[in-house]
Amino acid sequence: ATPTSIMVGTGRGAELGVLFRKGEALQVLKDARVVALDKTGTLTEGRPTLTDLEVGTGFERAHVLARIAAVESRSEHPIARAIVEATEKAGIDIPAITQFESITGMGVRALVDGIRVEVGADRYMRLLGLDVESFEQTAQRLGAEGKSPLYAAIDGRLAAIVAVADPVKPGTPIAIAALHQLGLKVAMVTGDNKRTANAIAARLGIDEVVAEVLPAGKVEAIQRLRGAYGPVAFVGDGINDAPALAEADVGLAIGTGTDVAVEAADVVLMSGSLQGVPNAIALSKATIGNIR
Ligand code: ADP
Ligand code: MG
């Protein structure tokens, strides 16, 4: 590609709300074989709401929710905001906590009135030696509905299953169809539950799902997809996505996402809509293709 064609392509990108931070990305993007997308905040709005709460025998709903919200009040995860908001809206007082701790990819814990409360994924409960089998039917239903199930333990006993749901962005289905039109494979990479991820992927016609990955697992997923299909474009918005954005052949960040993601990316989608991804690839094909 000539410097002039790169300039023209970069300029057209800007008109489309696609910011090329590196001119090289415009040349490489046309060769992508697979587009891998983070789920929360990328395919979805990243603003979940609390949808379900089921407590175990001997536990009282308002009491349990207050304790869950207390622990979450110190977390910055979007799940936490959903739970705290719903609790406040229900007019339930949220108690103070001590010894808050966040366990990456697992959940959060703290002491409420000196009593241990843990909230997180099923694997976190298993790590604590708790059996989540008693909520298995509910968990299956929630997963099939595309909701993310979480569990709470109080004083070392499994107390509840809760679910949050995060709506898909309105532009996501059309953007995925456009990527398929361009002949690309589409993959989802997420730290969320497998059932939930599979249900959302099936609805969107996504070809491959890599779920329940820790942040480092996203980098491995990129390497595996590259081995299977060829050059990978990865799209993400979170701090967790920065290593995968750097690892991908082209990293695209959602402009409304975290600064850390934007800084690790080659391309920034200014509007937050995923339509920028097929637009950027089409632009790369048109610009670079034309001058050969
Ligand atoms: P993701 O961005 O996909 O949510 P994370 O690594 O941040 O990935 O979290 C992975 C999983 O760990 C979440 O899907 C959730 O099950 C659990 N988790 C993380 N943070 C919290 C939290 N504050 N409260 C409850 N569960 C959490
Ligand atoms: Mg995200």
Image (cartoon, rainbow, N blue to C red):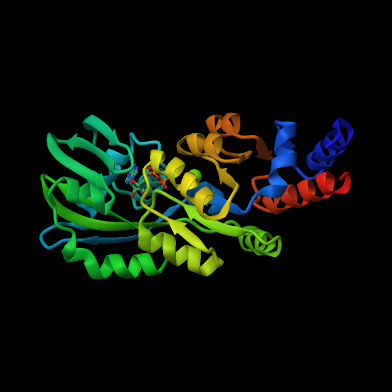
Q: Closest to the observer: 224 or 246?
A: 224
| Residue 99 placement: quadrant | top left
Which residue lies at the image location 45% right of the left edge and 58% below the top edge?
209
The count of marks equals 0
Q: From this view, report whether residue 11 is shown above or below residue 58.
A: above
Quadrant holding the C terminus:
top right
- Across and down, in percent, residue 105 comes to 33, 42
The answer to which quarter of the image holds residue 74 is: top left
Coordinates of residue 12 in the picture (x, y in percent): 84, 42
- The residue located at (12%, 49%) in the rendering is 129
x then y, percent, for residue 288: 81, 44
Give the left or right position of residue 98, taking residue 142 as reference: left
Query: Which quarter of the figure is the N terminus placed in?
Result: top right
- Of 117 and 209, nearer the camera is 209
Seen at 48% across and 44% down, the residue is: 223
Is 264 situated left or right of 130 in this image? Answer: right
Q: Is residue 1 above or below residue 183?
A: above
Is residue 7 among the parts visible in the rendering?
Answer: yes
Q: Is residue 18 visible?
A: no
Ligand 1, image quadrant it occupies: top left
Residue 52: % across, % down: 33, 61
- The correct choice, above or below, for 145 with respect to 221 in the image is below
Residue 162 as seen in the image, left or right of residue 268: left
The residue lying toward the viewer, choosing from 7 and 111, is 7
* Residue at 25%, 46% in the rendered image: 119
Could you tell whether 184 is left or right of 123 in the image? right
